[in-house]
Every structure is written in structure tokens, then in C-alpha cells.
Amino acid sequence: MSGALATLAMALPTADDVVAPGSGSFDVLIPLPVIVPLVAAALSIVAAGHRPTQRVIGLGALLTVVVGNIVLLARVDDAPDGIAASQGGGWKAPLGISLVVDRFAAIMLVVSSLMLISVLVYAIGQQAEERRFAAFHPVYLVLAAGVSASFVTGDLFNLFVAFEMMLVASYVLLTLGGRAGQVRSGMSYVVISLIASTFFITALALIYSATGTVNMAELSERIPELPSGVRTGFSLLLIVVFGIKAGLFPLFFWLPDSYPTAPNAVTAIFAGLLTKVGVYAIIRTQLLLFPDDARQGTLLLIIAGLTMVTGVLGALANDDLQRILSFHIISHIGYMIFGLALFTLAGIAGAIFYVVHHIIVKTALFLVAGLIERKAGSDRLSRIGGMVRSAPMIAVLFAFPALSIAGLPPFSGFVAKFALVDAGVLVEQWPIVAVSLVVSLLTMYVMGRIWSNVFWGTCEDEAVAERLAPGRTSVPLLMTGATVAVVVASLAMMVFAGPMYDLAERAAADLLVPQIYVRHVLGASS
């Protein structure tokens, strides 16, 4: 008995394992974007019978998160090393739950929270699923918490937990309304996500058995000590896991069927954020955990090229606006992976800038698609026409993000694509540069096709033409206002492209020196 007690005592944390109070900067702000939405979700459940109270709780929580994230980004960017770490429960890493925010994570927190609150306002204005289902607000807030947790977590197991939070919440949001098509597409999404989760938990078990930890800072030190083949295997396994979440070729097939069947507001936030969480995880793990000889640069370049081409061809082949935009998500994920696969400062900076640009612009496009469907009663290109005359405001709101996603100067899409092409030219990766340019031209063609069918010409469908007649169908003010806000944010990306790219470059420089991350996590309490 005494021997067992002695063993147990040795295993328990000691006073030396405890972080001294006040030893970490920004302790309150780091967990804020996770805790506030979860508390708000609980309060929203209590207020399930009173929709105005739920709205106040949801908007108040997300506004608090937005302000906190902006302050956190400013402080992290001003910090000498551009990073802040906090240990859950006051225990030193790796005993405690490490929460880490560097410039990359802080950028993602700010952009994601801005999109989350904008889309919530849009959903309230739409008065559809948000009005009919008391579960909408708490589930949406859980989704917001899961997204934020993915960005701040410092260990792979809690990243898995964050992904599962998003999975559960996203399935509920995808199937709100209970239409047969929604449930069928939602089931496909869940099955694929569960397969990815199975791969992920298997990867965690294998990594833990090989290294004795799932803390990413410790893994950064221990994985390089493993045999070369094991390192490569872990790298490939994590690419598969996060590639499913991101929609990489050939793992994207669930996305075009799942997103268009969801409510407009839900589709907008999924399109803007969820695939980018997968991209974030790929960038974070490939740069932090694996040394140069385990990085899959050539494979990622091939995957990036195939993802670009497959996505844009899918967009060309479809007539449904939301399916076209869904395939475009896939295509542009390829650009982000293109930047990462170069493993250079310019490439990673371009990838980070592209991620931010795409979150904002793609969210804006899906919000506009919702306005088009609300006004015309359809989103099929072959059924709509003449909206530049019947709905000029919607036409303007579509034009700006469409020109940006097509990569025309001076919009942020041009800056993002130019940065990636320039990075590819610097290392003489001519095939992927050529593919990116061709895909960009095809994207331009697709955006032109949407404009020509939806906004130009004449509407030949009598039912749609009747809805588009002056004074016949109005769009709620909150829906338009939220869309205007996101489109203005996309224009702000254009106006402040220089400072934003500089920030992305600083974030990329941090990612290329993982020792800074390791020192702040493992030494944050020393």
C-alpha cells in the first residue's frame, strides 16, 4: 500500500508545476473567445422561449469576442516575440491545457469573429431558421466557440475536441428545416467528418505512443527525434485528416453537396470559415511539428494544383449559383496550399493573406447569393436576369467581391494572387504558377458568366420576372446591412492591403521559427 501511495505521489503535479499568478500576459483575453460563446450558449438555452433575449445574448457575446480579439491582436503584434501563452488551471505545460496566440492565430480570431457577428445579424434579418428554431442561437454560439478553440489550442487533443464541437454544431445548423435534401446532404457531411475524426484520433494515439505527448510545443522537439519514415507518415496522416476538413483534392467531394442545401446564413459562415480552419491546422502542424525533411512540399504542390483545377472546372459545369460558389471554395483552397507548399517566407505570407482575403470575400459572395435568392426566388443562372435594373444595390454588392475573387486589380484578390505567383516565381516553381494563372482566368470567366446571366440580359422566367418587378419583393434591411458591412470589409482589405500584407509577413516569419512558440509554451511559466 505504501509503495502504491509513493508511486501516486510521484505522479501527481507538485508546486513546481504550478504557474505563478500573473506570470502570463493576456491571460484573460486568450480564453475569452472560447469561454464567452459557451457561456452565452448556455444562457441562450435558458432563454429558448424568448427570441429577442437570445438575439441580445448572441450579439452581445460575439461583440465582446470581437473587441477582445482586436485588443489581443494589437497586443500580440506589439509583443517582442509576437506571441502569448496561457496555461489552463495554472499548471505548467504540458500538464496544463496550453492556450497559445501568435500573430497568425490572432489574425484568424479577429477575422472569424467579425464574420460570425455579421452573419448572425444577417440571419436575424432573414427571419427564417433563426426565427423558427430556438436551437439556432445556442448551436451557432457553440460553433463560434469551436472555431476560436481551434485557433488558440496548443495541443492536438484539444484541437480534436474543437473540431468535434464544430462538427456537432454544424450538423445541426446544416439540417435546420428538416428537408429531405438537407438531411441527406447533412448525413454525407457527418459521415465524412466522422471518418476524418477517426483518422484524427488514430493519429493522436500513434503520435502519443511514439512521443509521449500531444502538446504541440513538445511535439516540435520530439518529432524530429523520430525515424525519418515515422515523421513522414505522421505528416501525411495529418494532411489527410485536415485535408478532409479543408476540402483538398481528392477529399473535397462532400462539400459541393452539403453547403448549397443549408440555410443561406449557415452556408455563408461555413463557406467563409470552416474550410479555413482545416487550412489553418495544416499550416500550423506542418510548420510547427515537422522538420524540413518530413515536409511534403512536392506532394502539397501537386495537391494544390489539382485542387485549383478541379474546383474551377466544377464551377464551370454548374448552373446553380450556390454550387458554383461552393466549387470556388475548393479552387481557392488550392491557392492557400500552394503558398504553404513553397515553405518560404513569401509563400507563407501570401497564403496567410489569401486566407484572410478569402474568408471575407467568400462570406460576402454567399451573403449576396442569399439576397439574390430572396429577391428572385431562385439562384439558378438560367432563370434569372436583369437584376442590374431591378435590384441595382444587390448588383453593386455582388460586383465588388466578384471582382476581388477573380483577382482583378486593385482588389485584395489581385494582391493575394500576385503575392503567391511572385513567391512561386522566386523559387522557380513554374508548373504551379502556370496552373494558378490559368485557374485565375477561368475564375474571371465564371464570375463574368454569373454577372451576364443574373444581372444583365432579360429574365425569361415569368415567375422570377414577376418577383423582380418594382415593389414586388423586398429584402429585409438587416440582411442588406450585414452584407454591406462584409463587402465594406472586403474593400478595406483592398485599401489596407499593404499593412495587412506586412502583418501577414510578420506572422509568416513567426511560423518559420518554431523555437519561439516552443519557448513561450514550455517556458511561459518558468
Image: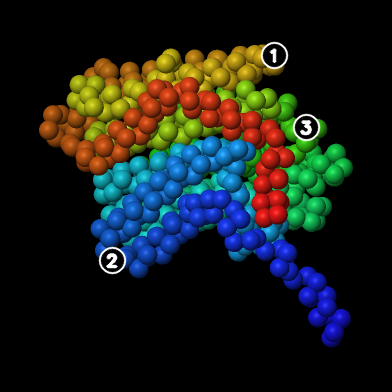
Percent across and percent down for residue 288 are 70, 40
Quick one: SS at disc 1? loop
Q: Nearer the viewer, mark 3 or mark 1?
A: 3
Q: Which dot marks residue 292? A: 3
Q: How is the image coloured?
A: rainbow
Q: Nearer the viewer, mark 3 or mark 2?
A: 3
Quick one: SS at disc 2? loop
Spatial distance from mark 3 to mark 2, Cα to Cα? 55 Å
- Horizontal side of 36 relative to 335 (left or right) equals left
- For the question of whether residue 299 can be seen, the reply is yes
- For the question of whether residue 197 can be seen, the reply is no
Percent across and percent down for residue 475 are 22, 38
Q: Earlier in the sequence, mark 2 or mark 1?
A: 2
Neighbour tally class for label 2: few under 14, some 14-19, many 20 plus, Cα within 10 Å: few
- Horizontal side of 24 relative to 376 (left or right) equals right
- Horizontal side of 282 relative to 258 (left or right) equals right
Amino acid carrying mark 2 in the image: Gly
Residue at 79% across / 39% down in the picture?
A: 232
What residue did someone put label 2 on? 49
Depth check: give the residue in front, 300 or 252. 300
